[in-house]
Image (cartoon, rainbow, N blue to C red):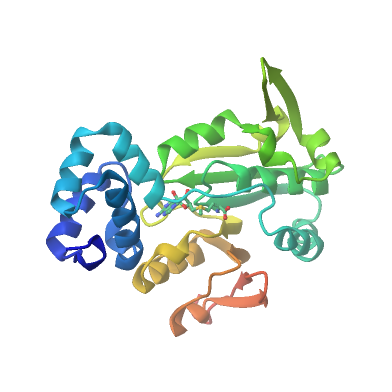
């Protein structure tokens, strides 16, 4: 039987879920078709044609476990990903946040599903540029991800030259320090930017964090079933301050009529939303 025809039934799913749950990855809420594609790809590479055999392989083979874990938690990202979103945020939303604060106070931002750190560092760079001359304003960015390896990489803050090559030269010179060792060149995020971001290993579905002015959750929800997405939107609603902002990925839409009542689309193309205050709040 070809792998394509194998069924990912409830027992098999439970087996894989047990393996990943202790590492903070809750597969139960992922779209089954997405999980199947990822498992099948690795099984084809290893020439394994049975899910049960593959689940045993994962218990014994650390390297393979890391491969599939990374594949399931997909952490592809880059600095200023979809730069038009950052441009529009900087132009239209950020000045509003600053003016609402009246020149002093703390701005809290959550980068939910931050992968290897490029997103929260980009947010820090954008805010730093905007508040550089306002000494009484502080920006605190909390960035979390289920993938411990991605968080460790993010905390180190060192990126290969390729990661920064398409950034404007001023962004590079203001925010990175070039490090060359032997034949290897890396760009390290400067300490002032690192200090703005706190990284945590954590699951959006179980972490309860509050009082944010903005939540960025980009290119994370696409892998989740509708019910999980609704749960996450409800969490974000509670996690935002009154009239706070939520930014999704360019390919993500908000499901469900209930959720649509919670947020107002401010910039439809860039997926920038604002929390709607409910009458009974
Ligand atoms: C494709 S990356 C997106 C990174 C970044 N937000 C961006 O748009 O460039 C998706 C990240 O979401 C993380 N992720 C998936 N489910 C998560 C959850 N429930 N809680 C926290 N992080 C999650 C994955 O580990 C992965 O690093």
Examine the rendering and report whether any part of residue 195 can be seen.
no
Res 26 → quadrant: bottom left
User: Residue at the spot x=61%, y=78% of the render?
Assistant: 264
* Extreme residue toward the bottom, this view: 257
- Residue 251 in sight: yes
Q: How many badges with numbers are in the image?
A: 0
Give the left or right position of residue 280, taking residue 243 as reference.
left
Q: Nearer the viewer, residue 13 or 255?
A: 13
Tell me residue 242's x, y (percent): 60, 66
Q: Pick whichever, 174 or 49, lies toward us.
A: 49
Q: Is residue 5 left or right of residue 266?
A: left
Residue at 71%, 22% in the rendered image? 179
- Write the residue at 63% across / 65% down: 245
**45 versus 8 height, above or below:** above
Q: Quadrant of residue 177?
A: top right
Q: Classify 188 as above or below 99.
A: above
Percent coordinates x, y for residue 122 in the rendering: 69, 46
Give the side of residue 98 with respect to residue 33, left or right. Answer: right
**Which image quarter holds the N terminus?**
bottom left
In front: 235, or 179?
Answer: 179
**Taking 132 as reference, is 211 left or right?**
left
Residue 91 higher or lower than 168, as above or below: below
From the top left corner, tell me how far across and down residue 76 is, in percent.
53, 49
Which quadrant of the figure has residue 118? top right
Image spot of residue 96 (x, y percent): 77, 63
Q: Residue at x 58, y 57 (%)?
A: 216
């Amino acid at each position: 039987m070809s792998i394509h025809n194998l069924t990912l039934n409830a027992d098999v799913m439970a087996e894989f879920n047990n393996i990943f749950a202790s590492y903070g990855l809750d597969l139960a809420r992922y779209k089954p078709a997405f999980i199947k594609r990822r498992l099948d790809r690795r099984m084809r590479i290893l020439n394994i044609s049975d899910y049960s055999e593959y689940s045993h392989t994962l218990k014994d083979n650390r390297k393979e476990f890391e491969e599939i874990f990374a594949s399931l938690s997909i952490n592809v990202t880059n600095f200023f990903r979809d730069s038009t979103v950052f441009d529009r945020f900087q132009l239209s939303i950020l000045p509003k946040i600053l003016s609402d604060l009246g020149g002093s106070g703390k701005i809290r931002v959550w980068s939910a599903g931050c992968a290897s750190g490029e997103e929260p560092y980009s947010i820090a760079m954008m805010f730093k540029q905007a508040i550089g001359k306002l000494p009484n304003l502080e920006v605190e960015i909390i960035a979390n991800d289920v993938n411990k390896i991605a968080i460790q990489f993010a905390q180190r803050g060192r990126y290969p030259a390729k990661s920064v090559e398409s950034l404007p030269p001023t962004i590079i010179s203001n925010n990175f320090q070039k490090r060359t060792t032997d034949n290897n060149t890396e760009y390290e995020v400067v300490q002032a930017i690192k200090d703005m971001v706190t990284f945590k290993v954590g699951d959006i579905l179980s972490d309860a964090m509050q009082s944010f002015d903005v939540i960025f959750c980009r290119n994370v929800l696409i892998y989740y079933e509708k019910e999980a997405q609704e749960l996450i939107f409800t969490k974000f609603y509670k996690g935002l301050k009154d009239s706070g902002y939520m930014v999704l990925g360019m390919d993500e839409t908000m499901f469900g009529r209930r959720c649509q009542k919670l947020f107002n689309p401010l910039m439809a193309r860039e997926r920038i939303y604002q929390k709607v205050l409910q009458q009974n709040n």
